[in-house]
């Protein structure tokens, strides 16, 4: 139920969603644009697609629940989110047992964190 508003926004903003896809999958039409990163349109879809299969259940690994802003923010705050997706030493590389995220998606998450993790 909690995803319905998000889905409606994506439908209403079809054109924006299309642009957003270009941000997430560079190579089609140009550079990786991280200048206008938002949580709902940029960061959450990356987590949703790549992390929630494991970090969204009723007992997520290490208690790291990434289903909503507060859980994602918590992991971003303590450095583990970026450490894990950048495959930094000291962190378990994520997504687990899958290729590293495309560079632009990592840059998107990093830009959002640098921006102060806005819930927008
Ligand atoms: C296939 C299941 C799976 C997927 C997909 C997955 N994780 Fe994990 N994650 C785990 C498990 C299991 C652990 C516990 C540590 C371990 O076993 O490596 C973990 C641990 C973590 C940690 C703690 C790492 C540390 O060393 O402190 C973070 C942060 C994390 N995951 C974030 C993510 C993010 C972000 C994504 C998506 C990009 C993701 N995970 C995708 C299963 C998964």
Image (cartoon, rainbow, N blue to C red):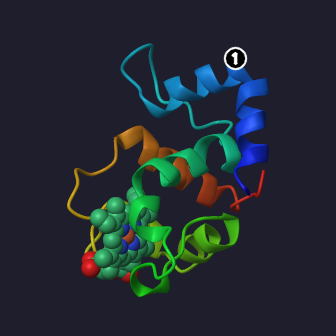
Residue 72 position, x and y percent, is 59, 68
Would residue 112 appear left or right of 101 to someone viewing this image?
Answer: right
Q: Please identify the quarter of the rendering in which residue 34 is found.
A: top right
Question: Dot 1 lies on which element?
Answer: helix
Would residue 54 appear left or right of 99 to someone viewing this image?
Answer: right
Would residue 67 appear left or right of 105 to someone viewing this image?
Answer: right
Of residues 83 and 12, which is closer to you in this image?
12
* Quarter of the rendered image showing ligand 1: bottom left
Q: Is residue 26 above or below residue 103?
A: above
Is residue 87 among the parts visible in the rendering? no
Q: Residue at x 66, y 40 (%)?
A: 41
Residue 19 position, x and y percent, is 61, 21
Q: Is mark 1 within 8 Å of ligand 1?
A: no
Residue 43 position, x and y percent, is 58, 49
Task: Give the total of numbered labels.
Answer: 1
Q: Which residue is mark 1?
A: 15
Q: Residue at x 70, y 39 (%)?
A: 7
Q: Residue at x 45, y 69 (%)?
A: 55
Instruction: Look at the image and tell me in which quarter the N terminus lies.
Output: bottom right
Outermost residue toward the top in this view: 29
Q: Residue at x 62, y 58 (%)?
A: 114
Of residues 116 and 57, which is closer to you in this image?
57
Outermost residue toward the bottom in this view: 62
Q: Is residue 105 above or below residue 69?
A: above
Residue 54 position, x and y percent, is 39, 67
Q: Residues within 10 Å of mark 1 (few under 14, many from 20)?
A: few
Would residue 20 appear left or right of 91 to someone viewing this image?
Answer: right
Is residue 42 among the parts visible in the rendering? yes
Of residues 58 and 38, which is closer to you in this image?
58
């Amino acid at each position: 139920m909690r995803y319905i508003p998000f889905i409606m926004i994506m439908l209403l903003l079809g054109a924006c969603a299309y642009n957003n896809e270009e941000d997430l999958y560079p190579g089609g039409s140009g550079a990786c644009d991280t200048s206008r990163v938002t949580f709902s349109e940029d960061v959450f879809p990356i987590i949703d697609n790549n992390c929630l299969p494991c970090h969204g259940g009723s007992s997520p690994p290490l208690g790291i629940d990434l289903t909503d802003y507060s859980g994602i923010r918590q992991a971003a705050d303590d450095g583990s989110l970026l450490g894990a997706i950048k495959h930094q030493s000291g962190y378990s590389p994520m997504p687990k047992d899958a290729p590293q995220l495309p560079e632009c998606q990592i840059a998107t998450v990093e830009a959002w964190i640098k921006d102060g993790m806005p819930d927008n």
